[in-house]
């Protein structure tokens, strides 16, 4: 009964908080993006068919329902729906982002892609996860199980967040990586510019994508900017560079006699 507000309640514990008679738990989309990305300069992930095989082994819906306990949303894009708010409402934003090409969960297709790659007999790789994101570690373990079914051994290693952050660079020798990004601007170009623009952590070099990002930065029309960014995301999706997993939610516990007006994704980073 001493706590008025508890921020960032772990999703694994939120059900326990919900049982407290004096508290309630509010869930809100927190502008976070979680996805896989491949370092295109590290073998064998320089092979598009290898990347395609891994992408087809990703079960986004299971991650959301099981690992996040439904408190999140399977992502179809790097941009979050909220970041499209200046031009589209929530339903329209999701419809726009769903038009970006997807690599659906399909183990048979994953096997076929690997068989067509330069590593038809499989290979072994390591992925790092941050110790502050247990849900990411769980997703990595689930992915490793699916990849084992097609002949890929993925070793998951949890490391301090500082080590994980240092690995998010094109100079890293890890070819498969998790990205966990919290947008602070609410601008649709924020995350795509980081993941696809100059100096991106995947070492992805596509002049057409850079041109689209540049044009998006030069226009003030919200809908036009979004269309250019979606076109950029479409090109990178076809190249299987980033594989969106989920858009996250955060849990905040409040004493039942307290609340916030106009509660939104920006509640804790705005006046």
Image (cartoon, helix red, strand yellow):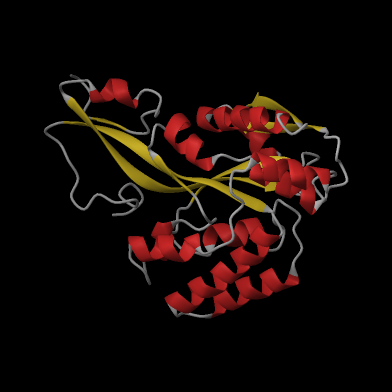
Q: Please report the residue visible at 68 percent of the width from the left and 70 percent of the height from the top.
A: 210
Q: Position of residue 104 (x, y in %)?
A: 59, 49
Nearer to me, 105 or 87: 105
- The quadrant of the picture occupied by the N terminus is top left
Q: Please report the residue visible at 43 percent of the width from the left and 35 percent of the height from the top.
A: 65
Task: Determine whether, in the image, residue 58 is placed left or right of residue 95.
Answer: right
Count of marks overlaid on the render: 0
Q: Position of residue 176 (x, y in %)?
A: 72, 41
Task: Determine whether, in the image, residue 169 is placed left or right of residue 64.
Answer: right
Q: Please report the residue visible at 67 percent of the width from the left and 75 percent of the height from the top.
A: 211
* As drawn, 129 above or below 82: above
Q: Position of residue 162 (x, y in %)?
A: 63, 33
Q: Is residue 212 visible?
A: yes
Task: Determine whether, in the image, residue 97 is placed left or right of residue 232.
Answer: left
* Residue 146 occupies quadrant: top right
Residue ranking furthest to the right:
118
Q: Please report the residue visible at 48 percent of the width from the left and 60 percent of the height from the top.
A: 98
* Residue 87 occupies quadrant: bottom left
- The quadrant of the picture occupied by the C terminus is bottom left
Q: Position of residue 132 (x, y in %)?
A: 53, 29
Nearer to me, 210 or 140: 140
Nearer to me, 239 or 115: 115
Q: Is residue 40 visible?
A: no
Nearer to me, 166 or 193: 193
């Amino acid at each position: 009964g001493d706590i008025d507000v508890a921020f960032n309640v772990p999703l694994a514990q939120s059900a326990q908080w919900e049982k407290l008679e004096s508290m309630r738990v509010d869930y809100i989309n927190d502008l976070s993006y979680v996805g896989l990305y491949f370092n295109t300069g590290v073998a064998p992930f320089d092979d598009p068919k290898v990347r395609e095989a891994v992408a087809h082994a990703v079960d986004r819906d299971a991650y959301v329902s099981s690992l996040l306990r439904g408190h999140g949303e399977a992502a179809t894009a790097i941009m979050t729906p909220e970041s499209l708010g200046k031009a589209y409402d929530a339903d329209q934003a999701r419809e726009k982002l769903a038009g970006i090409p997807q690599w659906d969960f399909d183990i048979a297709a994953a096997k076929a892609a690997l068989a067509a790659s330069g590593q038809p007999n499989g290979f072994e790789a390591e992925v790092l996860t941050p110790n502050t994101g247990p849900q990411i570690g769980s997703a990595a373990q689930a992915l490793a199980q699916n990849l084992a079914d097609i002949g890929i051994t993925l070793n998951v290693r949890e490391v301090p967040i500082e080590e994980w952050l240092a690995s998010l660079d094109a100079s890293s020798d890890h070819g498969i990586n998790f990205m966990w990004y919290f947008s602070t601007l609410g601008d649709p170009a924020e995350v795509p510019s980081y993941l696809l623009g100059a100096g991106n952590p995947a070492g992805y070099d596509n002049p057409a994508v850079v041109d689209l990002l540049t044009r998006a930065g030069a226009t003030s029309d919200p809908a036009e900017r979004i269309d250019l960014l979606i076109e950029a995301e479409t090109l990178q999706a076809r190249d299987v560079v980033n594989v969106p997993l989920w858009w996250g939610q955060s849990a905040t516990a409040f004493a039942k006699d307290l609340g916030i007006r106009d509660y939104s994704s920006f509640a804790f980073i705005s006046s």
